[in-house]
Amino acid sequence: MDIQTARDLMREWVQADALRHHMECVATCMTAAAARVEPDEAERWTVCGLLHDFDYERHPTPEEHPFVGIEILRERGDVDEEILNAILGHATYSGTPRETPMARYLFAVDELAGFIVACCKVRPNGIEDLAPKSVKKKLKTPNFAAAVNRDDITVGVEELGVDLTEHIQFCIDALRADRERLSL
């Protein structure tokens, strides 16, 4: 599947602007991650980010998401197993191990991208001058972006084997590079 097809599928399934925005932000971070570890696979990594939550709006329960979406993608036949496994692995309750760099990065950027966007919304300059120090301070405030799973951010960083500050900076840089399109 190419990026435009993935984006079209996402738009068909997701009506909420906030969820579409989240998926675009995760895709942006995934594109940057691919540039680090698998530059020739950037399109696949972007597709993974765009589709990771495409079934969530219609099937939000842990019994359904991302399982319904995976079955739909399998039936389509145009998304490979590595992407499907990465999408399954981003939901810890699926029991799917994150064995590939793609799967580990998807898990590591998903919650963090959402948290960074929340940080941008309370700053006068958005992402322009956002620093990891500010993000880390907000992470310690439980009622700020309370829906974000801080444990997933911690586990994601540990699975990547990177420093938290460096990973936050990596995600900020990825989002900042596309800030106009993402309205950050």
Image (cartoon, rainbow, N blue to C red):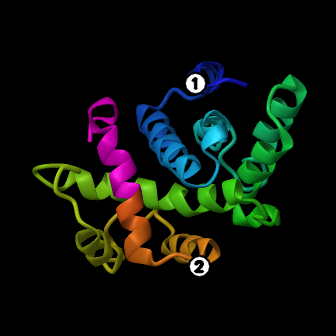
Q: Residue furthest front?
A: 40
Q: Residue furthest left?
A: 124
Which is nearer the eye, 146 or 69?
A: 69
Q: Which mark is residue 100?
A: none
Reply above or below: 143 against 179: below
Q: Is residue 125 left or right of residue 1?
A: left
Q: Pointer 1: what residue?
A: 7
Task: Tell me the SS state at disc 1.
Answer: helix
Number of numbered discs: 2
Q: Quadrant of residue 39?
A: top right
Q: Are marks 2 and 1 in contact (CB under 8 Å)?
A: no
How far across and how far down the image is residue 94, in percent? 79, 61
Q: Residue at x 54, y 73 (%)?
A: 157
Q: Pointer 2: what residue?
A: 158
Between marks 2 and 1 in the image, the one whose residue lies nearer the viewer: 2
Which residue type carries mark 2?
Glu
Which is nearer the eye, 167 or 97?
A: 167
Classed neighbour count for the residue bearing mark 1: other residues with Cα under 10 Å, few (<14), some (14–19), many (≥20)? some
Q: Is residue 20 left or right of residue 70?
A: left
Q: Please, what is the dominant secondary structure of the magenta stretch?
A: helix
Q: Is residue 54 left or right of residue 110?
A: right
User: Which span is picked out in magenta?
Assistant: 171-184
Q: Can residue 179 be found in the magenta stretch? A: yes
Q: Residue at x 56, y 22 (%)?
A: 11
Q: Residue at x 34, y 53 (%)?
A: 173
Which residue type carries mark 1?
Arg
